[in-house]
Image (cartoon, helix red, strand yellow):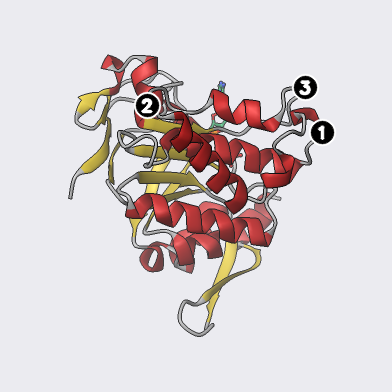
Amino acid sequence: MTTSLVLDLRQVAVRQRLRPLSLQVPAGSLIHLIGPNGAGKSTLLSAIGGLTSCEGEIRLLDRPLRQWSSAELALHRGYLCQQALPYALMPVFQYLTLHQPRNAAERDIDGAVGYLAEALSLADKLNRPLNRLSGGEWQRVRLAAVLLQVWPAINPRASLLLLDEPAASLDIAQRVALDSLLSELTAAGLGILVCAHDLNHSLRHAGEIWLLSAGELAARGHPRDVMQPAILSPVFGVKFELLPAGGTPWLVASGLAPQAATAV
Ligand SMILES: Nc1ncnc2c1ncn2[C@@H]1O[C@H](COP(=O)(O)OP(=O)(O)OP(=O)(O)O)[C@@H](O)[C@H]1O
């Protein structure tokens, strides 16, 4: 299988916020990056996205990230960071077109915008100014923009998508819609790395889990292997149980772990 990204942070990276890591994002994979608040998930995503400098080496499509120009990076990877509501008066449609890949035919761009707007229930919001959107609508607009940037029909060169808490503020229907769009992208060969907080969703939807704890990789592997109470409890400071629920068990937090309770 080809590899979208190779991450080899051998030195203490990003000023004590991340410890050495050596990881890969294979093409077509969906990896969930989980861990407590402050574990370093966003820092890692930002380093991979080329927005935070770090020691060590990050290779995108077998070429060191530092050799990529920002214009090239924009063609090959999409990056959704966390962001508050904007004050901008710009209409949704105009914001989306700012994120379209250059060189794509106008007709194809219109088709992709229409498809994503429909899939993310934004079709009736395209003329709405950004500052008059709800939190969930703004999140869907940002998602539509980053998906447009890497959408295979208009940008076949895209290989990597980085999403920092993409489901924040989304209702359940919108989350299902997002899952379906991400499946389309992995089927087209994109490697996707997602920072996530909903452990049960990650257990069911991720192809692989990376568990970060205090800037360090505490575990990595298949969701069913990593989402075990004995692995998660020391990292999150919470007691977990796995309850039977048809196919995939349901992970339930049943109180603070003793050491965390003492600390509190
Ligand atoms: N710009 C910054 N400068 C210095 N330290 C920072 C900066 N941003 C974050 N940190 C620190 O780096 C550590 C990792 O933060 P990061 O945002 O990567 O965590 P996270 O796992 O994404 O957390 P969350 O789940 O809360 O989003 C934290 O201790 C945080 O306080």
Q: Earlier in the sequence, mark 1 or mark 3?
A: 3
Which of these two is toward me, 40 or 200? 200
Residue 241 location in percent, x, y? 55, 74
Residue at the spot 41% in from the left edge and 29% down from the top edge:
105
Residue at the spot 34% in from the left edge and 45% down from the top edge:
191
Kindly identify the amino acid type of the residue bearing the numbered disc 1. Answer: Arg
Q: In which image quadrant can residue 4 be found?
A: top left
Residue 239 location in percent, x, y? 59, 66
User: Which element type, helix, strand or loop, lies under badge 1?
Assistant: helix
User: Which element type, helix, strand or loop, lies under badge 2?
Assistant: helix
Task: Decide: few, some or many residues near mark 3? Use Cα within 10 Å; few <14, some 14-19, many ≥20.
Answer: few
Is residue 41 visible to the viewer in this orientation of the structure? no
Labels 1 & 2 near each other (Cβ < 8 A): no
Query: Disc 3 designates what residue?
Result: 89
Residue at the spot 29% in from the left edge and 25% down from the top edge:
11
Which of these two is toward me, 183 or 203? 183
Q: Which mark is residue 132?
A: 1
Beta carbon at label 3 within 8 Å of ligand 1? no
Q: Quadrant of ligand 1?
A: top right
Query: Disc 2 designates what residue?
Result: 75
Residue 250 location in percent, x, y? 55, 74
How far, Cα to Cα, is label 1 from label 3? 8 Å
Labels 2 & 3 near each other (Cβ < 8 A): no
User: Which element type, helix, strand or loop, lies under badge 3?
Assistant: loop
